[in-house]
Amino acid sequence: MGFGDEMPEDEARVSGLVAAIDALPGLRTIRACAGHDEPIDSHRENNEFEVHFVADETAEAWASVKRIAHACETIGPASVSFYSDTGEYAFHLYGFIGLEPDGLAELIRADE
């Protein structure tokens, strides 16, 4: 189960991307932001988005992370970075400058 099972309605713009990540072996989304017209605190602006996910310690999970990184590199402007403050292998996927999350989701699904 990932974040998509509990996604707030105002984050619907990233729901396809969250579903694509949650469908990959060994990955689970933990939070997302679809961007906001008037962002506050750590929220993204309306032409940006982010999805955070964690990876199991398996070869399949690492292959899934590599698949997302390849999609980001191909479609740009997007990036994936690693962080470890959760006690798990956590990643931050960031899309900006008008990149649509559905386009990235399609590329992740197609990159098999």
Image: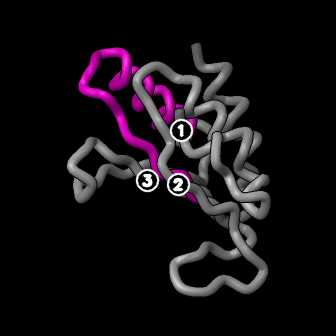
Q: Secondary structure at mark 2?
A: strand
Q: Earlier in the sequence, mark 1 or mark 2?
A: 1
Quick one: SS at disc 3?
strand
The CA span between labels 1 and 3 is: 15 Å
Task: Quickly name the residue at label 1.
Answer: 2
Q: Is residue 54 magenta?
A: yes
**What segment carries the magenta color?**
50-71
* Residue 69 image position (x, y, % from top left): 46, 37
**Which quadrant would residue 33 be assigned to in this image?**
bottom right
Measure how far apart labels 1 and 2 are at the Cα level: 9 Å
Q: Is residue 62 left or right of residue 21?
A: left
To which quarter of the image does residue 27 belong?
Answer: top left
Residue at 56% x, 33% y: name it: 21
Neighbour class for label 2 at 10 Å: few (<14), some, many (≥20)?
Answer: some
Q: To which residue does mark 3 refer?
A: 92
Q: Is residue 16 left or right of residue 2?
A: right
Q: Which residue is mark 2?
A: 31
- Residue ID at (73%, 39%): 16
Left or right of residue 41: residue 107 = right
Q: Position of residue 104 (x, y in %)?
A: 67, 40
Could you tell which of marks 1 and 3 lies nearer the N-terminus? 1
CA–CA distance in space, label 2 to label 3: 10 Å
- Residue 41: x and y, percent? 53, 85
User: Are circles 1 and 3 on residues that touch, CB within 8 Å?
Assistant: no
- Seen at 50% across and 34% down, the residue is 68
How packed is label 3: few (under 14 Cα within 10 Å), some, or many (20 or more)?
A: some
First of labels 2, 3 by sequence position: 2
Mark 2 vs mark 3: in front: 2
Kind of residue at disc 2: Arg
Above or below, 27 relative to 41:
above
* 57 part of magenta stretch: yes
Q: Is residue 10 left or right of residue 112?
A: right
